[in-house]
Image (spheres, grey):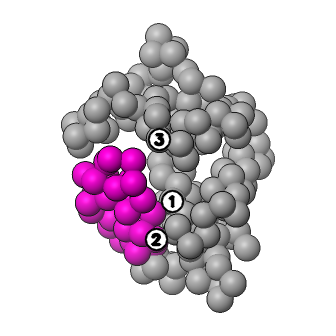
Amino acid sequence: MIRPADQRDLISLPAVEVAAGKIFEDVGMPEIALDVPPSMTWLGGFQRAGRLWVATDDAGEPAAYCAVELIGANAHIAQVSVHPRLAGRRIGAALIDTVGDWAETQGLDGLSLTTFRDVPWNAPYRARLGFRELPEGEWSPELRAVVDRETAQGLDPAARVVMIKPV
Protein backbone atom coordinates (compact mmCIF):
# COMPACT_ATOMS: atom_id res chain seq x y z
CA MET A 1 0.00 0.00 0.00
CA ILE A 2 1.22 3.50 -0.82
CA ARG A 3 0.25 6.34 1.46
CA PRO A 4 1.51 9.70 2.70
CA ALA A 5 4.18 9.18 5.32
CA ASP A 6 3.40 9.96 8.92
CA GLN A 7 5.89 10.87 11.60
CA ARG A 8 6.09 7.28 12.89
CA ASP A 9 7.39 6.15 9.47
CA LEU A 10 10.47 8.35 9.64
CA ILE A 11 12.37 6.02 11.95
CA SER A 12 12.19 3.17 9.39
CA LEU A 13 13.28 5.06 6.30
CA PRO A 14 17.05 5.33 6.92
CA ALA A 15 17.22 1.51 7.07
CA VAL A 16 15.34 1.33 3.77
CA GLU A 17 17.90 3.71 2.27
CA VAL A 18 20.87 1.69 3.56
CA ALA A 19 19.43 -1.56 2.18
CA ALA A 20 18.59 0.05 -1.17
CA GLY A 21 22.09 1.53 -1.38
CA LYS A 22 23.82 -1.82 -0.94
CA ILE A 23 22.80 -2.98 -4.40
CA PHE A 24 25.06 -0.30 -5.89
CA GLU A 25 27.96 -2.55 -4.93
CA ASP A 26 26.74 -4.93 -7.65
CA VAL A 27 27.38 -2.27 -10.32
CA GLY A 28 30.80 -1.22 -9.07
CA MET A 29 29.65 1.79 -7.06
CA PRO A 30 30.57 0.88 -3.47
CA GLU A 31 30.84 4.57 -2.54
CA ILE A 32 27.09 4.93 -3.09
CA ALA A 33 26.46 1.90 -0.89
CA LEU A 34 28.43 3.68 1.85
CA ASP A 35 26.46 6.93 1.68
CA VAL A 36 25.07 8.16 4.96
CA PRO A 37 21.29 7.65 5.01
CA PRO A 38 19.02 10.68 5.12
CA SER A 39 18.58 12.38 8.46
CA MET A 40 15.36 12.49 10.39
CA THR A 41 15.43 16.27 9.95
CA TRP A 42 15.64 15.95 6.15
CA LEU A 43 12.90 13.30 6.00
CA GLY A 44 10.75 15.18 8.50
CA GLY A 45 10.82 18.31 6.38
CA PHE A 46 9.30 16.43 3.47
CA GLN A 47 6.80 14.66 5.72
CA ARG A 48 5.59 17.90 7.33
CA ALA A 49 5.28 19.52 3.89
CA GLY A 50 3.09 16.61 2.68
CA ARG A 51 5.66 15.54 0.08
CA LEU A 52 6.83 12.17 1.43
CA TRP A 53 5.13 8.91 0.52
CA VAL A 54 5.81 5.38 1.73
CA ALA A 55 5.03 1.96 0.36
CA THR A 56 4.45 -0.62 3.05
CA ASP A 57 5.23 -4.32 3.03
CA ASP A 58 2.81 -7.12 3.90
CA ALA A 59 3.34 -6.41 7.61
CA GLY A 60 2.43 -2.73 7.12
CA GLU A 61 5.99 -1.51 7.65
CA PRO A 62 7.53 1.12 5.34
CA ALA A 63 9.72 -0.65 2.77
CA ALA A 64 10.04 2.12 0.17
CA TYR A 65 9.67 5.86 0.03
CA CYS A 66 9.66 8.87 -2.25
CA ALA A 67 10.55 12.41 -1.17
CA VAL A 68 9.56 15.32 -3.39
CA GLU A 69 10.62 18.94 -3.52
CA LEU A 70 9.10 21.68 -5.64
CA ILE A 71 11.37 23.01 -8.36
CA GLY A 72 9.74 25.53 -10.63
CA ALA A 73 6.57 24.05 -12.06
CA ASN A 74 7.68 20.48 -11.36
CA ALA A 75 7.54 17.98 -8.55
CA HIS A 76 11.21 17.05 -8.28
CA ILE A 77 11.85 13.54 -6.98
CA ALA A 78 14.62 14.18 -4.47
CA GLN A 79 14.84 10.51 -3.52
CA VAL A 80 13.04 7.29 -4.28
CA SER A 81 14.30 4.14 -2.56
CA VAL A 82 12.95 0.61 -2.44
CA HIS A 83 14.16 -2.09 -0.07
CA PRO A 84 15.67 -4.89 -2.19
CA ARG A 85 13.27 -7.44 -0.68
CA LEU A 86 10.54 -5.69 -2.71
CA ALA A 87 12.57 -5.41 -5.91
CA GLY A 88 10.80 -6.40 -9.10
CA ARG A 89 7.31 -5.59 -7.84
CA ARG A 90 7.10 -2.16 -9.52
CA ILE A 91 6.98 -0.43 -6.13
CA GLY A 92 9.25 2.38 -7.35
CA ALA A 93 7.03 2.86 -10.40
CA ALA A 94 3.93 2.94 -8.21
CA LEU A 95 5.51 5.57 -5.96
CA ILE A 96 6.40 7.68 -8.99
CA ASP A 97 2.85 7.26 -10.36
CA THR A 98 1.49 8.42 -7.00
CA VAL A 99 3.72 11.49 -7.11
CA GLY A 100 2.62 12.15 -10.70
CA ASP A 101 -1.04 12.01 -9.67
CA TRP A 102 -0.32 14.36 -6.77
CA ALA A 103 1.60 16.75 -9.03
CA GLU A 104 -1.30 16.88 -11.45
CA THR A 105 -3.76 17.75 -8.65
CA GLN A 106 -1.37 20.53 -7.58
CA GLY A 107 -1.40 22.02 -11.09
CA LEU A 108 2.26 21.24 -11.68
CA ASP A 109 3.63 20.63 -15.18
CA GLY A 110 5.53 17.44 -14.53
CA LEU A 111 8.07 15.42 -12.63
CA SER A 112 11.82 15.91 -12.67
CA LEU A 113 14.69 13.97 -11.17
CA THR A 114 18.40 13.40 -11.36
CA THR A 115 19.77 9.89 -11.49
CA PHE A 116 22.64 7.72 -12.62
CA ARG A 117 22.86 7.50 -16.40
CA ASP A 118 23.99 3.88 -16.72
CA VAL A 119 22.61 2.09 -13.65
CA PRO A 120 19.87 -0.23 -14.97
CA TRP A 121 17.32 0.63 -12.27
CA ASN A 122 18.03 4.36 -12.59
CA ALA A 123 17.91 6.27 -15.94
CA PRO A 124 17.09 3.26 -18.18
CA TYR A 125 14.23 2.30 -15.86
CA ARG A 126 12.97 5.87 -15.59
CA ALA A 127 12.98 6.11 -19.40
CA ARG A 128 10.69 3.07 -19.50
CA LEU A 129 8.39 4.98 -17.12
CA GLY A 130 8.12 7.86 -19.59
CA PHE A 131 10.92 10.16 -18.44
CA ARG A 132 13.21 11.71 -21.03
CA GLU A 133 16.63 13.25 -20.64
CA LEU A 134 16.51 17.01 -20.32
CA PRO A 135 19.44 18.55 -22.20
CA GLU A 136 21.63 20.85 -20.11
CA GLY A 137 20.59 23.85 -22.18
CA GLU A 138 17.02 23.36 -20.94
CA TRP A 139 17.82 23.14 -17.23
CA SER A 140 16.24 25.79 -15.07
CA PRO A 141 18.47 27.60 -12.58
CA GLU A 142 16.87 25.46 -9.86
CA LEU A 143 17.76 22.21 -11.64
CA ARG A 144 21.28 23.53 -12.21
CA ALA A 145 21.49 24.14 -8.44
CA VAL A 146 20.46 20.51 -7.79
CA VAL A 147 23.21 19.23 -10.09
CA ASP A 148 25.73 21.61 -8.54
CA ARG A 149 24.74 20.42 -5.05
CA GLU A 150 25.15 16.77 -6.09
CA THR A 151 28.54 17.54 -7.61
CA ALA A 152 29.63 19.23 -4.39
CA GLN A 153 28.56 16.06 -2.54
CA GLY A 154 30.93 14.04 -4.71
CA LEU A 155 28.67 12.73 -7.48
CA ASP A 156 30.27 12.81 -10.94
CA PRO A 157 28.05 14.96 -13.16
CA ALA A 158 29.14 12.95 -16.22
CA ALA A 159 27.56 9.86 -14.62
CA ARG A 160 24.30 11.68 -13.87
CA VAL A 161 21.35 12.72 -15.97
CA VAL A 162 18.47 15.16 -15.47
CA MET A 163 15.16 13.69 -16.56
CA ILE A 164 11.65 15.05 -16.89
CA LYS A 165 8.17 13.67 -17.48
CA PRO A 166 4.96 15.64 -18.04
CA VAL A 167 1.91 14.88 -15.90
Q: Which of marks 1 and 2 precedes in the sequence? A: 2
Q: What kind of residue is marked 3?
A: Val
Q: In which quarter of the image is residue 116?
A: top left
Please indicate, yes or no, whether residue 50 appears anywhere in the rendered image: no
Query: Is disc 1 placed on a helix, strand or loop?
Result: strand
Quarter of the picture containing the N terminus is bottom right
**163 left or right, relative to 97:** left
Q: Residue at x 37, y 68 (%)?
A: 18
Q: Say which of marks 3 and 2 sits in front.
A: 3
Q: Does the magenta stretch include residue 16?
A: yes
Label 1 Cα neighbours within 10 Å, binned few <14 / some 14-19 / many ≥20: many
Q: Residue at x 70, y 40 (%)?
A: 129
Residue 16, disc: 2
Relative height, residue 167 to residue 60 (above, below): above
Residue 152, disc: none
What separation in Å lies between label 2 and label 1 (alpha carbons)? Answer: 7 Å
Q: What kind of residue is marked 1?
A: Ser
Q: Which residue is tagged 3?
A: 119
**102 left or right, relative to 146:** right
Q: As rendered, which of 89 and 139 lies closer to the eye?
A: 89
Q: What kind of residue is marked 2?
A: Val
Magenta-tinted stretch: 13-41
Label 3 Cα neighbours within 10 Å, binned few <14 / some 14-19 / many ≥20: some
